[in-house]
Amino acid sequence: MTHPLVQYYRCEDVLADSLRTETLQGPAGFFRLGELVCYGQSGAGEVSPNPHGRLRDFAPHFLAACRSGDAVLPFDPAQILTNLRMESYSRTGRSRPMALLHDLLHRSYYQVRPLLPVALRSPLQRLHLQRRKEESFPRWPVDCTVDKLAAEFLRAAMLANQQTAAPFIWFWPDGMESAAIMTHDVETRAGLEFCDCLMDLNDSFGIKSSFQIIPESRYTIPPGFLKHIGDRGFEVNVHDLNHDGHLFREREEFRRRVREINRYLREFEAQGFRSGIMYRNQQWFGDLNAEYDMSVPNCAHLDPQSGGCCTVMPYFVGNVLELPVSMTQDYALFNFLQDYSIDLWQSEIEMVREKHGLISFIVHPDYVIEEQPRTIYRLLLQHLERIRQEGKIWFALPRDVNRWWRQRTQMKLVRSGAGWTVAGPGSERARVAYAYHEGDDVRYCFQGWDSMHCLGDRSPLVPFSV
């Protein structure tokens, strides 16, 4: 299995091999690396069952090991990155009686949910989620713990390997700083009927998007509707099976339903999937025949299921590529936060851009039919059009991101004279970048720079802050 650090950067394997780990003992738990919350085992066995309060800080040990060039670490970087992305930390701390109570409340709520208007559901949901928004981990509204840890571990590997800089395959095609996708989950007949208007609105700003369609129970899909979306240059994906909130409740029931979901993936000619209400169990994703999933939020404080993958980058769960949702959903923005502006979205966009990640939106056709939310969505599209004109963000469909990320995974760095090239399908759009450390910081630049000088006529130094 590819080391998560190599998977993240597409750097040389030798860097990950430089990170040696002490013998780990005891159960997994929480500890800190400076300000960053980690979850995993430790060599010292000093971990906490929850992320709150005073946590053991391994930063002094970590920094000393890095500076000495002897990076024997009291934790496993691969385990930590995997645990956070897979939300392993969120399965701790709940007793069996509390789990049974939660399951009972969950069943009861979704039995009556279809009868509750949004005006009644919203206060109940706000009451349930208000306390969670105040939790310190994951950090709301965007948590970049995995991305910051990846940079820290890469710096440690460079120091241990006595490298000033490390080449890697840049995250996005054509040297784009970040990427962005717009997605629409269609939950009701009214939303289905509004899809054409939404496509017109998106097209007026030159932004294509994907529509996630519920196959059963919620509405009848008109003949030719899916083809019509595709003919207009948009994308169709499968959204749950019937959106009743129970897809991931029991393993055997999931297996039964996923057989139908896989049939609809073929019938819709869809590559992607998203579960209803963002319920998920990443351990079960292997049963999906989707190429990619979009069911995992970066930080789930405003979602019914807590957790979050703590990264703004795509990552693989087995053979399924996860495209995490990094932006607050429109429903939560309008109904939980009661914020009819794009201020939060603008802040989140900048947080993701700072880490060169995937700006990933969910905007429901159902919730932008009315004039006020539609006006806010129009303002968002105007803002996205402005930043797209800067030429630094790749606006793509989810299937395009999936194709690129899979190609990037197969690409290889090849030494070429004093520099490096990229080999493999799609490499004509790839760029060689360097990570280099300045003190305790890691910065990026494109090829054209090494530890001593610019490389002839190649691209000039283009620094990025991590």
Image: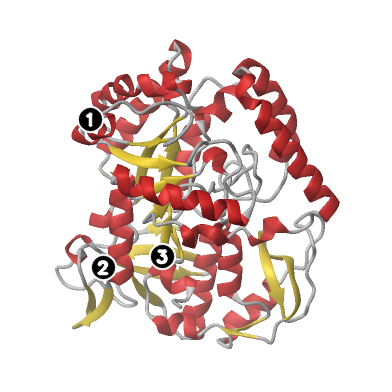
Between disc 3 and disc 1, whose residue precedes? 1
Residue closest to the eye, 2 or 54: 2
Residue 393 visible in this rendered orientation of the protein: no
Q: Secondary structure at mark 1?
A: helix
| Disc 3 to disc 2, C-alpha distance | 31 Å
Residue of label 2: 447
Q: Earlier in the sequence, mark 3 or mark 2?
A: 3
Lateral position of residue 261 relative to residue 144, left or right: left
Q: Rounded to the nearest whole Å, what is the CA distance between mark 2 and mark 1?
A: 43 Å
Frontmost of labels 2 and 1 is 1
* Residue at image mark 3: 319
Residue type highlighted by circle 3? Asn
| Residue at the image point whose x is 44% and y is 48% from the top | 260
Q: Residue at x 59, y 49 (%)?
A: 248
Q: Amino acid at mark 2?
A: Gln
Secondary structure at numbered mark 2? loop
Which residue is nearer to you in this view: 48 or 196? 196
Amino acid on which the number 1 mark rests in the picture:
His
- Of 114 and 233, nearer the camera is 114
Tell me the tag on residue 228.
Answer: 1
How many residues crowd around disc 1 within 10 Å: few (fewer than 14), some, or many (20 or more)? few
- Say whether residue 291 is visible: yes
Q: Percent position (x, y) of residue 443?
A: 42, 63
Q: Nearer the viewer, mark 3 or mark 2?
A: 3
